[in-house]
Image: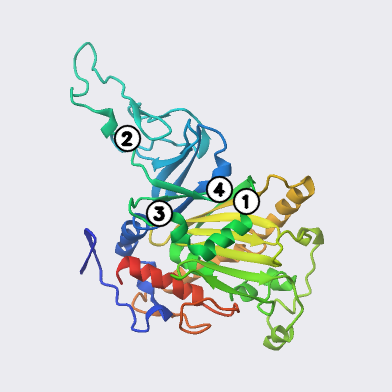
Amino acid sequence: MSKLGTETTEIISWPEEGVTRVPYQVYMDPSVYEQEQLRIYRGPTWNFLALEAELPQSGDYKTTFVGDTPVVVTRDRDGEIRAFVNRCSHRGATVCMDSCGNTKTFTCVYHAWAFDAKGDLKGVPFRSGVEGKGGMPEDFDTSKHALHKLRIETFCGVIFGSFDPHVMPLQEYLGEKMCGYIRRVFNRPVHVLGYNRQSMNNNWKIYFENVKDSYHASILHTFFSTFGLNRLSQRGGIDMDDTGMHHVSYTYGSSNENEDTYKQANLRSFNSKYKLEDPTMLEGRKEFADGITLAIQSIFPGMVLQQIHNTLAVRQLLPKGPEKCELHWTYFGYEDDDDQMTTMRMKQSNLVGPAGFVSLEDGGVGELVQRGIVRDKDKSSFVEMGGKTVQSQEFRATETSIRGFWKRYRELMGY
C-alpha cells in the first residue's frame, strides 16, 4: 500500500514505457476511483459547470456535479454566479432536487433549513424551540453553517468551478491556445437549444480517451466517411496546450483527396452504397472563417466542446463509479441565428447525442473495452499511434492527446 493524501490506495504498477502504456487496473479499481475524486475533482482542476446562458436571470439555478459530488450553480440577486455543494449543512440531505429553475431560497425538505442563492443559511425552524423548550444552543451561529462553496470563474460565458482555493487562475489553467479555441466558438452571445443525457457502463477515462482519439472516427463511425463528413485524408491536426492535458482535434472542410488510401485499405465505410433519404440533414453554412468544419476540444478533466459542421454543443463527462459514467450534452446556437440556421442546427444534431448517427458508437465501444479487460488488471493498453511523445501534430492518425491526458493524470495521482 502507498500513502496518497489522507487515504491509502493499492500501488499501481505503471509500465516503464510511461504514457504509451496504460494499466487496465486504473479503469476498474475502486481505490483508484476514490483517489480520483480527491486528487482530481477535489484537486487543482477547473470543472465545467454550466453556460451563463442557462442562468440569464437572478434566481436561476441548475444542478450538476463535480466528479460525483452534487453541486448547485446559481445566479444571485446581484447577478453574480455562485456554486455550492448540494448537501444540507444540517444532516447532509440533498437540498435542491430539481434539475433547474428559479428561486430566492433553497429549502431542505428534511428539516426546512433555508439557504439563499449564495449558499448562506438564512432560516432554521424551531431555532428557539417550542414554548421555550429545546431549540438550538445560544452560541448557534448561522454564518458557520453555510453550504460548502466552490470557487467560480467564467470565460466567454462558460462557467467553471473548483474545490481548490489555491487553483491557478482559469485562463492560466486553460492556456493561450485553448482560450483561443473557446473564443472561436463562443464569439458572441449564445442560446441553449436543448439537452441529452446518457449513461455508459464503462469507466469515465475510457470515454475521455475516446474523445482524444482522433483516428478512430474514420473506422468506427461509418457515417462520417460514408457521407464524406470526416476522413483522415482531409487536412487537419491535433493542437495541445503546453501541459498536454487539453487538446483540440480539427478538420478542414470535405475533400476527395487521397481517397485511394481508403480504397486500398478496403474499409467498409468507403465501399458503402447507402444514401440518405433526406440529404438536407447534411446541408449547412460556412460560419467560421478559418475553414474548420469539425473541431473537438477537451478540457481536463471532463469537458468537451464540439463543432461538427453547424452543430455546437458542450459535453460534460461525469464519473458514477469505477465502471459507470454519464455524459450530459448541452446544444446551443447564437442569439442572432435566423430561423433557417436554428432549424439547420437542430437537424444536424441528429449526428450526435446518445442515438446520433455518429456518436452512438462512442456510447457503446467503451463498454466493449470494460468487458474485455475484466480479468486482466495487470495488463496494459498500447498507445503509440503517431509516436511516443506528447505534442501538437499536423495530422490526426495519432494518439498524442491520449498520451497528454495520461501525463497529467499521473502527475495528479502521484503514479
Question: Which corner quadrant of the image does residue 377 belong to?
Answer: bottom left
In space, the residues marked 4 and 2 are separated at their CA atoms by 27 Å
Pointer 2 or 3: first along the chain: 3
> How far across and how far down the image is residue 237, in percent?
60, 75
What's the image's color scheme?
rainbow
- Packing grade of label 4 (10 A; few <14, some 14-19, many >=20) is some
Report which residue position mark 4 lands on. 157
Quadrant where the N terminus sits is: bottom left
Pointer 3 or 1: first along the chain: 3
For the point 61% across and 62% down, the residue is: 360
In space, the residues marked 2 and 3 are separated at their CA atoms by 21 Å
| 2 and 3 marks in contact (CB < 8 Å) | no
**Numbered disc 2: secondary structure:** loop
- Packing grade of label 1 (10 A; few <14, some 14-19, many >=20) is many
Report which residue position mark 1 lands on. 331
Tell me the mark number nearer the camera, choosing from 1 and 4.
4
Tell me the mark number nearer the camera, choosing from 1 and 2.
2
Relative to 169, say whether 232 is above or below: below
Report which residue position mark 3 lands on. 67
Question: Which corner quadrant of the image does residue 261 belong to?
Answer: bottom right
Report which residue position mark 2 lands on. 146
**Numbered disc 1: secondary structure:** strand
For the point 39% across and 40% down, the residue is: 86
